[in-house]
């Protein structure tokens, strides 16, 4: 029997390289628990699913123009500090 990745981890891995805004609707439907998809400075998914309180990462939101914003009320993704 194969050891498969949980759905959220598999989703993030499968969509690495895609811009967050391009697949926002699909991301919103996934239960990531206390984890978030990781994005780079351009809002592109890295393929990783990271705990929201992981040291070295900040929660962020991606606006409609694709810009990444770190702020205390962010909830969409994480980005490396």
Image (spheres, rainbow, N blue to C red):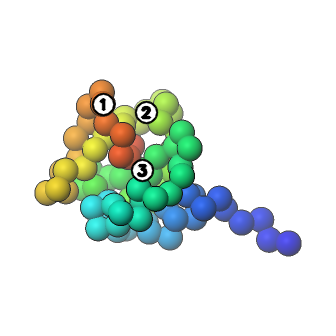
Residue in the picture at 60% in, 62% down: 7
Front tag of 3 and 1: 1
Choose top left, top right, bottom left or bottom right for residue 42: bottom left
Residue in the picture at 52% in, 65% down: 11
Quadrant where the image shows the N terminus: bottom right
Choose top left, top right, bottom left or bottom right for residue 73: top left
On the image, numbered disc 1 is attached to which residue?
73
Instruction: Tell whether label 2 touches label 1 (CB within 8 Å).
Output: no
Apparent side of residue 75 relative to residue 29 in the rendered image (left or right): left
How far apart marks 3 and 1 lie (CA) works out to 17 Å
Mark 3: secondary structure? strand
Q: Which residue lies furthest to the top in this view?
A: 72
Q: Is residue 46 visible?
A: no
Name the spot of residue 27 as percent of width and height, x first. 42, 59
How far apart marks 2 and 3 lie (CA) works out to 12 Å
Name the spot of residue 66 as percent of width and height, x first. 19, 56
On the image, numbered disc 3 is attached to which residue?
38
70 in relation to 48, above or below = above
On the image, numbered disc 2 is attached to which residue?
56
Q: Looking at the image, is mark 1 or mark 2 earlier in the sequence?
A: 2
Name the spot of residue 20 as percent of width and height, x first. 32, 60
Residue in the picture at 33% in, 61% down: 24
Q: Which residue lies furthest to the front in this view?
A: 29
Mark 2: secondary structure? loop
């Amino acid at each position: 029997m194969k050891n498969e990745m949980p759905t959220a981890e598999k989703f993030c891995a499968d969509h690495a390289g895609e811009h967050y805004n391009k697949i926002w609707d699909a991301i919103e439907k996934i239960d990531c628990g206390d984890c978030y998809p990781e994005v780079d400075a351009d809002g592109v998914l890295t393929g990783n699913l990271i705990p929201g309180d992981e040291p070295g990462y900040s929660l962020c939101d991606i606006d409609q123009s694709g810009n990444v914003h770190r702020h205390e009320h962010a909830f969409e993704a994480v980005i490396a500090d």
